[in-house]
Image (cartoon, rainbow, N blue to C red):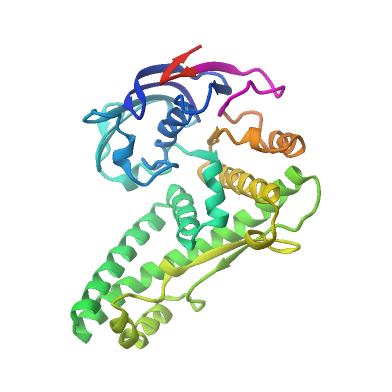
């Protein structure tokens, strides 16, 4: 897929903007704080109506605005040209595709795959396990609706079980929720294991291109419950009720999973240099993009938010080697890109965009 146009109103510092995005290479040029990242953030909403910069959707509204509107023209290999409209206000959102309202988010997630690359991706490596689970959940939800449904059922079940634990719910009540949660937990663990096994070799290949050497990057899934069939989960929760009741929380399950990036020298979080960590995060995003293309059958769009300038020349050259020529890349920076094809450049100043 690729973007051909975006109209944006009352989004962050953008009062109104309309950009033609027909080129495969589009560059947003301007000083820091002018609105480049805001435009990329708006483009990034099309995969799951989630920002790659914040979990607070109210932060997307322009100051004093009641709601933002983003209208996209998207060229899709399967559906031709599609008009997508997203309207958000506070915690609410409305989605229309060619004028038809989308009622279920599960019917929308992954239909228009984009992959953001930003300095915030370092939190996938350096941050808490919740950051890495969020990466996996967005990746899998975009390609598998059954995973998304299982994830929703599981989190609802954990929240209800925790409420029962805090108020001293009966054995019968806890058993009922645990029996309902267990198949969803098994599906989540199975999906995460398969995704890690598929993404891992792609990550290694891309990283070796970025680094021009074998530094042994590997992806390891760290399941909280290693026996991951439904009955194993149910038994773990049954056996853990007393301790869980004291804490008022469910201590075991997929909501405690993690994954680790390792290099030859050891864990990348502990032993990787700053350059290695940045290259690993770029490689992980490119591996995610390759995974989307393989699973969904069409190319994603890359949104590179000022990250290419953070790579040294060798790794930047490796980045371009790893990107298929037919992928659309929309990037931002404070200086014009050097080489690597013709770019359609938009100047950005105080929320205004000029070709």
Q: Is residue 186 above or below residue 104?
A: below
Q: Which range of residues does the magenta coloring cover?
A: 330-347
Q: Residue furthest top?
A: 355
Q: Which of 2 and 342 lies nearest the eye of the viewer?
A: 342
Q: Is residue 310 above or below residue 329?
A: below
- Asked if the magenta segment contains residue 222, the reply would be no
Q: Is residue 20 above or below residue 212?
A: above
Q: Which of 154 and 256 lies nearest the eye of the viewer?
A: 256
Could you tell me residue 306's position as x and y percent?
57, 33
Could you tell me residue 259's position as x and y percent?
56, 63
Could you tell me residue 240's position as x and y percent?
36, 85
Tell me how many marks there are: 0
Residue ID at (24%, 28%): 65
Instruction: Report whether 167 appears left or right of 59.
Output: left
Q: Which of 219 and 9 lies nearest the eye of the viewer?
A: 9
Q: Which of 151 and 308 lies nearest the eye of the viewer?
A: 308
Could you tell me residue 274's position as x and y percent?
67, 49
> In the rendered image, which quarter is residue 182 located in?
bottom left
- Asked if the magenta segment contains residue 332, the reply would be yes
């Amino acid at each position: 897929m690729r973007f051909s146009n975006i109209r944006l109103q009352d989004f962050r510092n953008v009062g109104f903007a309309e950009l033609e995005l027909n080129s495969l290479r589009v560059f947003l040029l301007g000083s820091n704080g002018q609105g480049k990242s805001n435009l990329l953030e708006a483009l990034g909403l099309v995969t799951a109506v989630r920002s790659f910069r914040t979990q607070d959707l109210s932060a997307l509204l322009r100051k004093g605005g009641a709601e933002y509107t983003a209208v996209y023209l998207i060229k899709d290999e399967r559906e031709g040209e599609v008009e997508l409209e997203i309207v958000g206000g506070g915690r609410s959102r409305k989605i229309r595709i060619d004028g038809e309202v989308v009622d279920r988010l599960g019917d929308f997630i992954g239909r228009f795959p984009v992959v953001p690359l930003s300095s915030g991706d370092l939190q996938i490596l350096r941050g808490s396990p919740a950051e890495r689970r969020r990466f996996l959940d967005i990746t899998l939800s975009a390609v598998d609706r059954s995973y998304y449904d299982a994830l929703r059922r599981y989190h609802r079940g954990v929240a209800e079980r925790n409420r029962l634990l805090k108020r001293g719910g009966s054995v019968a009540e806890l058993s009922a929720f645990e029996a309902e949660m267990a198949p969803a937990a098994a599906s989540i663990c199975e999906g995460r294991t398969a995704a890690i096994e598929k993404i891992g070799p792609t990550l290694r290949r891309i990283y070796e291109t970025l680094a021009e050497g074998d530094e042994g990057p590997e992806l390891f899934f760290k399941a909280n419950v290693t026996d991951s069939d439904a009955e194993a989960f149910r038994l773990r929760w049954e056996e853990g009720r007393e301790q869980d009741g004291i804490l008022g929380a469910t201590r075991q399950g997929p909501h405690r999973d993690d994954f680790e990036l390792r290099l030859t020298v050891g864990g990348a979080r502990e032993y990787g240099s700053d350059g290695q960590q940045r290259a690993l995060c770029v490689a992980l995003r490119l591996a995610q993009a390759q995974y989307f293309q393989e699973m969904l059958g069409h190319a994603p769009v890359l949104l590179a938010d000022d990250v290419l300038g953070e790579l040294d020349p060798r790794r930047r050259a490796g980045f371009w080697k790893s990107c298929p020529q037919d992928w659309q890349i929309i990037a931002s920076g404070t200086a014009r890109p050097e080489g690597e094809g013709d770019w359609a450049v938009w100047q950005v100043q105080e929320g205004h965009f000029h070709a």
